[in-house]
Image (tube, rainbow, N blue to C red):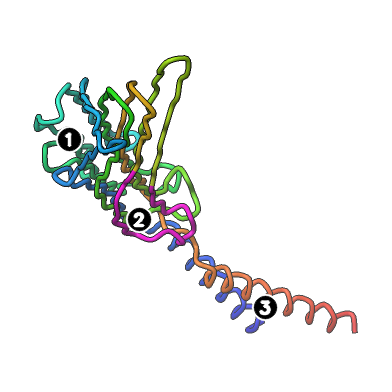
Amino acid sequence: MNTIKRSLIVIVCSIGAVTSQISVAADTTATVSIDWSQFQISVSGVNGIVPAVTFSNQFTSLNSSASVPSDQSENNSKSAYDWTSNQSTNADAGTTHANTSASLSTFSGNAQAVNTDDSYWNTSGASSSGNRTENFSFDGPGVLTVTVPYTLNITGGDPYNYYDSTSASINGHAYFYGYEGNGNFDSQSNASFSLNSYYYGQSPQSQSGNLVFGIFASGPGSGSLGINFSASAGGVSMVPEPESYAMLLAGLGLMGAVIRRRSMSKNG
C-alpha cells in the first residue's frame, strides 16, 4: 500500500508540473526598424547615357492594433501622399499596445502583447504594419537599384501554435513595363525576410541586413516600387516541456508496474 501511495504522489507531482507550465503567461514583443535615412535609389544607363527617371505618387500607410479578449480593443490607421511627412499611430488595450511611425529618417513598427488571462486559447494580441509605395518612369534603357537597411526583432511567442506566435517581417517589390517599336518588355524584383516564433525555436530572435532589388529597362516605360513591414505579438502560455511529459509517463509507468505486481501476487 505504501508503494501505491508513493506512486500516486509521483503522478500528482508530474501532472502538477505540467499544468503549472501551461498556466504560466509570458509577454511577447515584435519590432521592425527600417533606416529610411539610408534608403537609396540609384540609376545607371547604357553606353554612358543615363536615362531620366521621374518619381511620382508617393504614398505611406500605417496601422496599429491591440486587443485583450473579452475586455477591450483598439485599432488606428493613417495615410499620407508624401514620404517626407512625420506621422505615427498608436493602439492600446490595457498594457498591450502597438505603434508605428514614419519620417524621413525612420519607418518602423512595434507590437507588445501582455497576457492578462490564464486561458491558453484566450490571449492578448497586438500588431503593427506599414507600407510605402511610389511610381516611376524611364525615358530610355537603364537599370534602377533600390537598397534599404532593416532590423527585425522578436521576443517570446508560441513555438507550437501559429495563431499565438510572434513574428516580424519586411518585404520589397519593384515592377516595370515598357514598349518600344514593335516590342514590349517587363522586369520585376522581390525580396523578403522574416522571423517567427512558430518555427519551434529554429528562427533567430534578431536579424539585420539590406533589402535590395532592381529593375532592368530595355527602353521607355513605367513601374512601381514598394516597401512593406509587419510586426505581430501574440500572447502565449508556456507549453509543457519534454521533461514534464517524461515525469508524467514515469509516474504512470510506475503505477502500472505496481498494479501488475499486486495482480500477479493475488493470482499466485
Q: Secondary structure at mark 1?
A: strand
Residue 67 visible from this viewpoint: no
Q: Is residue 256 above or below residue 47?
A: below
In the picture, the disc for residue 254 is 3
Side of 7 where 205 appears, left or right? left
Where is residue 93 drawn, in percent x and y? 23, 37
Q: Range of the magenta residues?
A: 193-212
**Helix, strand, or loop for circle 3?**
helix
Tell which circle, 2 or 1, labels the residue nearer the N-terminal end: 2
Q: Relative to the observer, which residue lies in front, 159 or 40?
A: 40
Q: Is residue 229 above or below residue 182?
A: below
Inspect the image, locate mark 1, and give the three-letter code of the amino acid beneath it.
Asn
Q: Check disc 1: other Cα within 10 Å, few if <14, some if 14-19, many if 20+.
A: many
The amino acid sitting under disc 2 is Ala
Q: Nearer the viewer, mark 3 or mark 1?
A: 1
The residue shown at (49%, 59%) is 200
The residue lying toward the viewer, choosing from 255 and 99, is: 99
Disc assigned to residue 25: 2
Q: Nearer the viewer, residue 102 or 20?
A: 102
What is the spatial separation of the Cα atoms under label 2 and label 1, in whole angstroms? 24 Å
